Every structure is written in structure tokens, then in C-alpha cells.
């Protein structure tokens, strides 16, 4: 379950209710969850706690996919899918795998995104977008000159800014989904201590290891 409460249809303000009607027609998304793409849909119901934030995020989705953008949708989805993977969000990655195919990437390319560095599925232009995305996300924006120059050979200045803003924004969404355990990121912490078997003499073993390192 998400870590924050969800807003039922009965409490949703008109602008939120409009999205509920589009995504969950005839249903309360809290008591009858599920979207057409198969997700639980609790991103929407949790973000609805603060309607201003909900509306800001929704407006951003529309802006990124607007026909006013200079950035090729294929490059946008390549960056967003990679950002979801590198930020460790199952939800963002899974959703944008589908969007990437719709934007023109092949199945082979989508499957290769997690290990793009060793794949031959991408053109030099696509590799420039992927390299830039990695330095935005994994290096926290510490983009190297060579990486940026390779990108500038592919994209206009306007498209570079659009890509940068989109990738950074979806990196934020990926982080939020993990922190609040939304959608497919409702996953328990996997890095935990594993107890030793009963009677395993753990104390003696650890003491012997400690002594051997002295």
C-alpha cells in the first residue's frame, strides 16, 4: 500500500475528479483500483492529496508530449525509459517501455536499454541521448564536455533543454514513486540483515573472522 492516504472520488475537487472520470470511469479509484494499462492507479489518488501538485504534474505530462516540442518523441522516451531504469523505479521504467515503443523504438531497443552501453541496437545519435541521460541521473548533472558536444550534434538547443527538463522531471517522479511506494514501486526494502540459522554459532564465527584479520 502507498505510504500516504488516497483521495476517494467523494473527496476529489473538480479538477481531480475530471482525471478520475477519464482514468477510472464510473469507479472510485480507491475502492476499485486499476487503470487501462494495468497499473493500480494510486499515483493519481495519492497526488490528489494536494490538488496544486496534482495539477502541476498533470500539466507537465501534457507539456512534454505537446506537438509544440522540438524534441523527437523517440529521443524523449529513450531518455525517460533510461531515467526510470537508472533511478530504480519499476513504475516509470515499465510505463515508458510502452511509450518508447509507441514513439518508434523497436522491441530490441527497448529490451537493450538497461545495458545500452554494450548493445549494438542503438545509433550514434541514440547513444548520445542515452549517455547524456546517464550523466544527468547517475552523475547528478555532472555532464562531461564530450558528452554534451555529442548531444549537440544531434539536437537543437531547444531540444536539448526539453530533453534535460523531461529527464530531470521524470527522475523526480521516479524518486517520489519509490519513496511513497506508489504503483509498481510498492516494494519492501530488499537490503536487510539475513539472520543466521539457529545453532549456527554466529558469535564464534564472527570472532574467528575478526581475529584472523588482526
Image: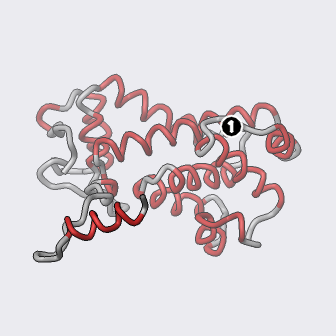
Rendering coords of residue 123 (x, y %): 81, 63
Question: With 124 as the anchor, is 74 left or right in this view?
Answer: left
* Residue at numbered disc 1: 69
In the depicted structure, whether residue 135 falls above or below residue 40? above
Rendering coords of residue 9 (x, y %): 16, 39
Rendering coords of residue 147 (x, y %): 80, 44
Give the tally of numbered discs: 1
Q: Is residue 68 visible?
A: no
Question: With 11 as the anchor, is 114 left or right in this view?
Answer: right
The part of the image, by quadrant, that contains residue 143 is top right
Instruction: Residue at 70%, 53% (x, y): give it.
Output: 130
**Placement of the C terminus among the 4 image quadrants:** bottom left
In the depicted structure, whether residue 37 falls above or below residue 79? below
Q: Circle 1 — which element?
A: loop
Rendering coords of residue 32 (x, y %): 15, 55
Instruction: Residue at 40%, 66% (x, y): give it.
Output: 212
Q: How is the image coloured?
A: secondary structure
Question: With 37 as the anchor, is 158 left or right in this view?
Answer: right
Q: Is residue 202 visible?
A: yes
Instruction: Residue at 13%, 31% (x, y): give it.
Output: 11
For disc 1, the neighbor class at 10 Å (few under 14, some 14 to 19, many from 20) is: some
Question: With 120 as the anchor, is 210 left or right in this view?
Answer: left
The part of the image, by quadrant, that contains residue 120 is bottom right
In the depicted structure, whether residue 71 falls above or below residue 99? above
Amino acid at each position: 500500500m502507498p505510504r500516504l492516504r488516497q483521495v476517494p472520488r467523494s473527496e476529489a475537487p473538480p479538477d481531480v475528479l475530471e482525471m478520475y472520470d477519464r482514468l477510472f470511469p464510473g469507479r472510485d479509484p480507491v475502492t476499485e483500483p486499476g487503470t487501462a494499462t494495468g497499473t493500480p492507479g494510486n499515483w493519481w489518488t495519492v497526488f490528489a492529496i494536494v490538488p496544486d501538485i496534482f495539477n502541476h504534474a498533470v500539466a507537465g505530462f501534457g507539456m512534454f508530449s505537446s506537438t509544440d516540442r522540438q524534441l523527437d518523441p523517440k529521443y524523449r522516451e529513450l531518455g525517460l525509459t533510461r531515467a526510470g531504469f537508472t533511478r530504480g523505479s519499476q513504475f516509470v521504467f515499465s510505463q515508458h517501455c510502452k511509450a518508447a515503443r509507441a514513439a518508434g523504438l523497436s522491441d530490441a531497443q527497448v529490451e537493450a536499454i538497461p545495458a545500452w552501453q554494450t548493445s549494438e541496437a542503438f545509433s550514434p545519435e541514440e547513444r548520445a541521448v542515452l549517455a547524456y541521460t546517464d550523466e544527468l541521473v547517475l552523475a547528478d548533472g555532472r555532464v562531461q564536455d564530450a558528452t554534451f558536444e555529442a548531444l549537440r550534434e544531434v539536437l537543437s538547443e531547444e531540444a536539448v533543454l526539453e530533453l534535460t527538463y523531461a529527464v530531470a522531471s521524470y527522475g523526480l517522479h521516479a524518486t517520489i514513486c519509490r519513496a511513497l511506494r506508489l504503483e509498481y514501486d510498492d516494494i519492501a526494502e530488499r537490503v536487510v540483515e539475513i539472520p543466521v540459522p539457529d545453532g549456527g554459532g554466529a558469535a564464534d564465527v564472527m570472532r574467528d573472522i575478526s581475529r584472523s584479520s588482526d
